[in-house]
Amino acid sequence: MTESTSSQPDSYEAAVERLEQIIDRLDSGQAGLRETLDLCREGRELVTYCAAELDAVSAGLQELRLDELAAKLEQQPAEPRQS
Amino acid sequence: MGTTLERMNLPGPFAVGAYARKLEEEMRRRARVLLIGEVTGLSRSKTQAYFELRDAEGAVPCAIWLNDLEKLDLPEGGLRDGAEVVVGGGPNYYRGSAHSSPSFAFRATHLRLAGEGDLLARLQALREQLRAEGLFELQGRLPRPRLPKTIGVVTAEGGAARRDLVAGLRRRGWAGTVVWAFAPVQDRRAAPAITAAIQGLAARPEVETIVVARGGGSLADLWAFCDETLCRTVAMLRVPVVSAIGHERDSTLIDDVAAVACSTPTHAPEAVVPLDCGAARESLLRCSSALRRAGEGAVGVRTRHLVALARGPARALRRERIALNQKTREIRAASERGVGERTAFQRRIAGVVLDRAARRAAGPEAKQRRDALARAEVAFRAHDPERTLERGYALAEDADGEPVTSAASARALDRISLRFSDDRIDVKPT
C-alpha cells in the first residue's frame, strides 16, 4: 500500500512527483481495488491542483516595477491612519 | 586630565612639525608597490590628478602629477570614474606648513588601465576566498520552484537582456508576473545598485526566483558582477538567484554563488521556469487519461471477474451435464452393441445347435426314407407305360391322344398314331 494523502501539495513539483508515483503504482497492477480507487481519487485532485497552477501562469504576462511596488507599500501604512 | 596623561607614561611631548617630518620620512621609505582597484572621485588640480582607488574592502587616496600622467600614453578618457586601474608608487605623507594643510596620498608615478589578466587574477583570488568560505554551495541548496508564479528580474531598463528574457518566457508558455528591478549594469554605481535591487526583490514574499541579467561585454564591463559585496549578498539570499551575465565564454563571480548560472540571458527562461508549460499541460492530460483508465479498468476487470465467477457454478453444472449425457450415450451405445453381439452370438450358437440337431435328425431316418422312395420309384417305374414302350411295345392313340384299345376302334378311325418310346407315327387302319 503506497502512502496516500489528500492534503494540498506543497508545490507543483511535489504534486507532479506524487502523481508520477501514483501512475507508476497503478501501472504496476499490484494495487488492490480499494487502493486503486483511492489512488485515482488522489490523482484526480492532484491533476486539478496542477491544472490550476498552470492556469495561474497562463492568464497573461504581468509586468510590475519594484520601485512602484515599494512606493505603494510606503503609502499603505498611511491609509489606516486617515480612516 | 593631565594626571591621566602622566600615568600613561608616553614619550614626548614632541613638536608636531618634527613629528610630521619624521612621519613623512617613514612613509616615503615604505616599499613601492602596485595596487589594483576602481577609480572613484576623480578630480584634477592645475598640477595633479586626485582619485580614490577602491574595492569592496577599502580605499586608498591617490595622487599623480599631471606631468607623470601625460607620459603614460593612456587612451583618451581612460582615467575615469569606474575604471579599473593598476597604479605603481608608494605612500606619501605631506606634512603641510604654516599655511598649508597636511595630507596623505598614495603617490602614483605609474598608472595603466587594468587588463584582462589583472582582473582575472583578482577574480581568481576572490573566487578562492568565497569558495573557501563555502559561499558557492548555499544557493545551490535552495529549493527552486519549477513553476514560479512571480519572478524578479534585475537588469538594465533599456537592455536587450530584458527583451530576450520576456521573449523566452513567452516561448515556454509562461505568462505569470515579472517584477522588474532596474539597475545600471556597468559602472561604479552598478554593483551597489544591483545589490540593493536584489535585496529589494528578495524582500517581496511573492517573488519566488530572481534573475540577474546583462548582455555580453569585456570582463571590465562585467566587473560589477564580480563585486565581492554583491556576490556575498547573493550567496546569503534565501531566494534562488539565476545569473545570466554576458556571453557563453564570460564567467563572473556571481555565476559561482548563484543557484544557477546561465551562459546568456537567452537561456535564463529555461532556468527560471524549468517547466515547459505547454509540455506540462500535455503531460497532465496524459496523467488524467491514465488515471481514468486505471479507475475504470480496475472496476471493469473485477466486474468481469465477478461475473465470470458468478457464471462458474452454472458452467460447471453444464459441463458435468454434458459429460453425463456423453457417458449415458456411451453406455447406451455400449449396451446396444453388447445386446447385438450377444444376439448374434446366440444366433450363431442356435444355428449350430439346430444344424447339429437337424443333422442328427436327418441321419438314419432319411436313409430309410430315401430307400423307401427308391423302392417306390422302382415299383412306379414298373408300371409306367413308358417303360413298356422301351421294351418294344407301341401304344395306339387317336387324334386326341386317347388310347385305342381295340382293332375295331382302330378301324373306325381314319387315322391313328402309334407312339413308340422315342417318337410317334401316324398310320391308317385298314
Image: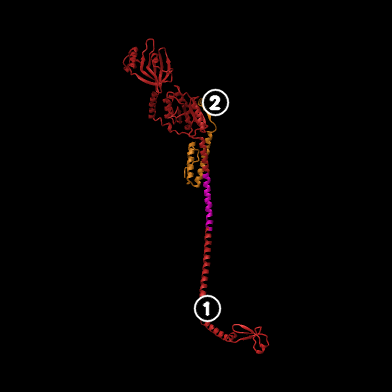
Chain colours: A orange, B red
- Residue B385 vs B328, above or below: the answer is below
Residue hosting label 1: B358
Q: Residues within 10 Å of mark 2 (few under 14, many from 20)?
A: few
Q: What element carries label 1?
A: helix
**Between B17 and B278, the one nearer to me in the picture:** B278
Residue at figure coordinates x 53%, y 29% from the top left: A62
Asked whether residue B202 appears in the rendered view, the answer is no
Residue at the outermost top position: B99
- Residue type, mark 2 in image: Glu
Q: Position of residue B81 (x, y in %)?
A: 43, 19
Read off the chain for label 1: B
Q: Position of residue B424 (x, y in %)?
A: 62, 83
**Between A22 and B342, the one nearer to me in the picture:** B342
Q: Residues within 10 Å of mark 1 (few under 14, many from 20)?
A: few
Q: Where is residue B329 in the image (x, y as percent from the top left)?
A: 53, 63
Quadrant of the image for the N terminus of chain B? top left
Quadrant of the image for the C terminus of chain B? bottom right
Q: Relative to residue B349, is residue B131 drawn left or right?
A: left
**Residues under labels 2 and 1: Cα distance?**
145 Å
- Residue B204 vs B98, above or below: the answer is below
Looking at the rendered image, the disc whose residue lies closer to the viewer, 2 or 1, is: 1
Residue B310 in the magenta stretch? The answer is yes
- Residue type, mark 1 in image: Ala
Dots 2, 1 in contact, CB < 8 A: no
Which circle marks residue A79 in the picture?
Answer: 2
Majority SS type along the magenta span: helix
Which circle marks residue B257 in the picture?
Answer: none
- Residue A82 vs B99, above or below: the answer is below
Q: Where is residue B281 in the image (x, y as percent from the top left)?
A: 52, 37
Q: What stretch is highlighted in magenta?
A: B293-318
Asked whether residue B334 appears in the rendered view, the answer is yes
Read off the chain for label 2: A
